[in-house]
Image (cartoon, coloured by chain):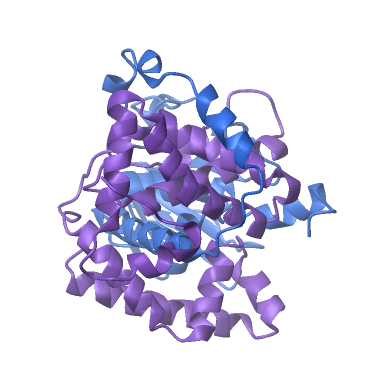
Chain colours: A blue, B purple
Amino acid sequence: MSHYHPDELMLMNYAAGNLPTAEALIISVHLASCHQCQTYVRQTNLLGGVLFEKITPATDDKLDDVDAFIAALPDRKNNLNGKNSSTPSGYRNPLGQYLPDDLRTLAWKKQTNTISKFDLNGLVGEKGANVTLQKISAGARVPKHTHKGTEYTLILSGGFSDELGVYHKGDFISRDASHKHSPTALQNEDCICLTVLDAPIRFTGWMRILNPFLS
Amino acid sequence: MRLKIATGQAASMHGSETSTPNQDWAELLKRVAVRDDRAAFRELYNHFAPRIKAYAINQRFGQQAEVLVQEVMTSVWKNADKYNEGIANVSTWIFTIARNQRIDILRRMNRTNVEVVIETEELWQIPTEDTTVHSIQQISTESFVKKSIDTLPEEQMIALRKVYYEGKTHEEVAEELNIPLGTVKGRIRLSLQKLRMIFEAKDL
């Protein structure tokens, strides 16, 4: 049960498909355990669907090709054998299949005596992504720091406190450059967080870089 | 089952509260799922493909707009059995597929390594079953939401369209309209607040 959630504008950007992969990752991990945000994403998806329905349709000038395209679609029945029964149904943790159930058993890289990290950038596979798991020993304090962009943190186990509040498992916290904070892990257990520093480049920007003729 | 919707007139037909066109689309999807009904699929194609193409063009896919149309419609064909009327209406479901395919194409172009990376469908999941209590009324709400959106001020609609159709960030919207970032965010928040009130009134 989360008490701190992503901002509604961020959830809407997620539903619109405008978030960089790393930010979509932390949102989708949060969604797996947050019914409130699931409902909100459902609503903003519905908004997307209604806007999509209201879009001015483009003319289709290749009607002959359509018949060929449809005729060439493979028979569905042959595709389905045994596939559907295993398809998960609700929101699931997208990291689940990549990480052990007990995160403490990961090959953590020690940063200091009390802080370790585990790099997830390879999983995101995208330039500029900055995604890590962080582990702070129970009761330990992270030195005061600030960030260039915005830092998003999702607590996966344990909890921490900083100048602005106390946070527990499932909470989603965002801090921009104006916050200088020094989180302190709660006393009773190690705190493990998923942390994303927002990427300076976004989808639309890349499109322009890659396709200078499009815009 | 009768469905003769010229794409250009679809909006007006869908406007009335009494007709529930989603049931028609859902019925067509079911026919695809149950018996590979290509004629039913053709009707879905006629309605949705021109919208997907418009979406792709707005998202600056240019010459590749057709690629997105074909990928999305292929996915609709393959996944017809996964559509669940209790969770989303058909246009929302197809919108989420189009959004995901669009992201997937961009991700493939921008990939920094060839190793296993997390799948787009894991990051932008399209649930096939409801895990919350809401949603039965989803369908009847669609036309209501459509009407409510029509009452939003034009300046809010413009911002929503740029975010959803054109994939613009708030910063880009602000730059394009030559207004402060805070104003863009304010407009979007106001429209979201209004929509939330609608959803809450409908207990969605």
Q: Quadrant of residue B57?
A: bottom right
User: Is residue B75 visible in the rendered structure shown here?
Assistant: yes
Please report the residue visible at 53 percent of the width from the left and 47 percent of the height from the top: B49
Please report the residue visible at 38 percent of the width from the left and 48 percent of the height from the top: B93
Q: Quadrant of residue B37?
A: top left
Position of residue B196 in the picture relative to residue B72 (left or right): left
Say which of A150 and B59 sits in front. B59
Position of residue A2 in the picture relative to residue A195 (left or right): left
Where residue A179 appears, as percent x and y from the top left, is 54, 70
Position of residue A110 in the picture relative to residue A79 (left or right): right
Say which of B126 and A57 sits in front. A57
Say which of B140 and A94 sits in front. B140
In the picture as drawn, the residue positioned furthest to the right comes out as A213
B150 vs B20: above or below: below
Please report the residue visible at 29 percent of the width from the left and 33 percent of the height from the top: B31
User: Is residue A95 visible in the rendered structure shown here?
Assistant: no
Where residue A61 appears, as percent x and y from the top left, is 66, 48
Indicate the quadrant containing the N terminus of chain B: top left, top right, bottom left or bottom right: top left
Where residue A167 appears, as percent x and y from the top left, is 33, 58
Number of numbered discs? 0
Indicate the quadrant containing the C terminus of chain B: top left, top right, bottom left or bottom right: bottom left
Say which of A35 and A186 sits in front. A35
Where residue A118 appears, as percent x and y from the top left, is 54, 34
Please report the residue visible at 45 percent of the width from the left and 56 percent of the height from the top: A15
Q: Quadrant of residue B78?
A: top left
Position of residue B130 in the picture relative to residue A72 (left or right): left
